[in-house]
């Protein structure tokens, strides 16, 4: 796993309470009037704030030293503020006369999966994406997640250019879950979508000859994802998904250039740059309907009173390392934990399940084999559970 940007974390103590700054002048230039206060302590004027955002973005990319001049980078465009802000940062960095100019070649992809919207609204989102990307002078490719899930053909038949018509149907959500048990929980459906999208992105990147993918998760998304992975027993995914770089695939790396940004920074970056795009309505969900939405509520509520919450979670994620293995899970592609001399969390979970559901003989010489991981299995521990809701395994 690549690890960059440690020094960009602020030095908040663990779980500190709110401390509102009363500074009337910018903490950085010490002369201009304060326009906004970040993390309840850092007062910025408009100009210093924008300068700081640009520096943080470029330094996150620069420290990794991964992208070479001329490399093609696949950029996942989503219908949200962070995605548009990232597009703007990239465009700004590519423009001539900018110090430390970026010099890679962005290719944009939009994955259509907005099933909570009407057909007309879904077409409007694509039209809007086309308009936004056009204003930034980038090429846009479109792909339907439902078609990818149902199609066994090659990826080139699924990708279309913005000028072509992407097939959108009311049946798409049904098509997406065609091979999933009807009583599958919302948590498992969300997990399947997340894995499917990641695999699709990597396939699109390979097809479009891109060695890198930019996604637009901000710090809050990473923290929620980390706790979700803990809750869904996807421990081996945490080091890969909790930092800047996911380098599990040998040919394509997934990078998260906004992973140190918070929602307020994105909000004011778009405001101060006059980026006024109207995004589609969010899906109204009951926070208790899935583990993912529940953890989102938990992190957002805690962060409101304890501003160090998200950074604390991110710092924990940054300290974890992946357990190496030669075999990868067929579903999520993460290396599968192999048997080791030390007790793994998977074995502990199996042992706990064994002792709580059946009568065991502690003197049984074969006992350890009963909770040991199965050699040569196709799925990681989490996907093994998830695959039970698939009709075709
Ligand atoms: Zn200033
Ligand atoms: Zn897996």
Image (cartoon, rainbow, N blue to C red):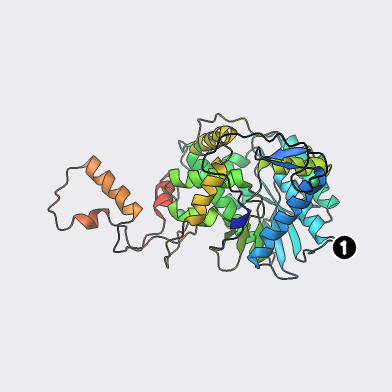
What percent of the width, then of the height, locates residue 217? 63, 48
What percent of the width, then of the height, locates residue 298? 52, 34
Q: Residue at point 30% right, 57% down?
A: 343
Q: Residue at point 66% right, 68% down?
A: 65
Position of residue 202 relative to residue 131, above or below, is: below
What percent of the width, then of the height, locates residue 98? 84, 61
| Residue 39 is at least partly visible in this image | yes
Give the mark count. 1
Figure quadrant of residue 95: bottom right
Task: Tell which residue pokes out farthest to the bottom in this image.
Answer: 69
Tell me the SS state at disc 1.
loop
Q: Which of 6 and 26 lies nearest the eye of the viewer?
A: 26
Q: Which of 63 and 331 lies nearest the eye of the viewer?
A: 63
Left or right, residue 132 beside residue 241: right
Figure quadrant of residue 103: bottom right
Q: Residue at point 69% right, 46% down?
A: 78
Q: Which of 168 and 266 lies nearest the eye of the viewer?
A: 266
Mark 1 neighbour class, 10 Å CA radius: few under 14, some 14 to 19, many 20 or more: few
Residue that numbered label 1 is attached to? 97
Left or right, residue 209 beside residue 193: right
Left or right, residue 171 beside residue 387: right
Left or right, residue 80 beside residue 251: right
| Residue 151 is at least partly visible in this image | no
Position of residue 190 relative to residue 288, above or below, is: below
Figure quadrant of residue 13: top right
Mark 1 vs ligand 1: CB under 8 Å?
A: no
Position of residue 159 relative to residue 11, above or below, is: below
What percent of the width, then of the height, locates residue 245? 59, 60
Task: Tell which residue pokes out farthest to the right in this image.
Answer: 97
């Amino acid at each position: 796993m690549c690890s960059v940007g440690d020094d960009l974390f602020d030095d908040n103590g663990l779980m500190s309470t709110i401390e509102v700054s009363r500074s009337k002048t910018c903490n950085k230039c010490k002369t201009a009037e304060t326009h906004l206060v970040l993390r309840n302590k850092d007062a910025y004027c408009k100009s210093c704030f924008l300068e700081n955002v640009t520096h943080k973005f470029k330094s996150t990319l620069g420290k990794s030293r991964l992208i070479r001049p001329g490399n093609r980078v696949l950029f996942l465009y989503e219908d949200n503020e962070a995605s548009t802000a990232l597009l703007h940062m990239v465009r700004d960095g590519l423009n001539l006369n900018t110090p430390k100019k970026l010099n890679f070649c962005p290719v944009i992809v939009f994955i259509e999966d907005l099933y909570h919207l009407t057909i007309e609204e879904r077409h409007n989102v694509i039209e809007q994406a086309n308009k936004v990307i056009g204003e930034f002078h980038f090429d846009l490719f479109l792909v339907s997640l439902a078609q990818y899930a149902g199609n066994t053909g090659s990826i080139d038949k699924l990708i279309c250019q913005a000028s072509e018509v992407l097939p959108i149907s009311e049946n798409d959500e049904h098509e997406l879950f065609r091979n999933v048990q009807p009583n599958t929980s919302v948590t498992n459906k969300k997990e399947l979508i997340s894995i499917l999208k990641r695999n699709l992105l990597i396939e699109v990147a390979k097809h479009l000859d891109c060695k890198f993918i930019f996604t637009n998760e901000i710090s809050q998304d990473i923290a929620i994802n980390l706790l979700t992975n803990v809750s869904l027993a996807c421990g081996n995914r945490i080091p890969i998904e909790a930092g800047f770089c996911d380098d599990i695939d040998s040919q394509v790396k997934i990078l998260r250039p906004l992973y140190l940004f918070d929602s307020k920074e994105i909000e004011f970056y778009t405001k101060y740059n006059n980026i006024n795009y109207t995004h589609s309505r969010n899906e109204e969900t009951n926070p208790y309907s899935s583990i993912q939405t529940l953890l989102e509520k938990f992190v957002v509520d805690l962060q409101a009173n304890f501003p160090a919450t998200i950074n604390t979670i991110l710092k924990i994620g940054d300290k974890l390392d992946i357990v190496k293995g030669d075999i990868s899970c067929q579903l999520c592609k993460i290396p599968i934990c192999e048997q080791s001399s030390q007790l793994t969390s998977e074995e502990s979970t199996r042992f706990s399940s064994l002792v709580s559901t059946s009568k065991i003989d502690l003197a049984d010489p074969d006992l350890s084999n009963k909770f040991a991981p199965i050699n040569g299995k196709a799925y990681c521990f989490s996907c093994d559970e998830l695959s039970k809701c698939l009709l075709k395994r």
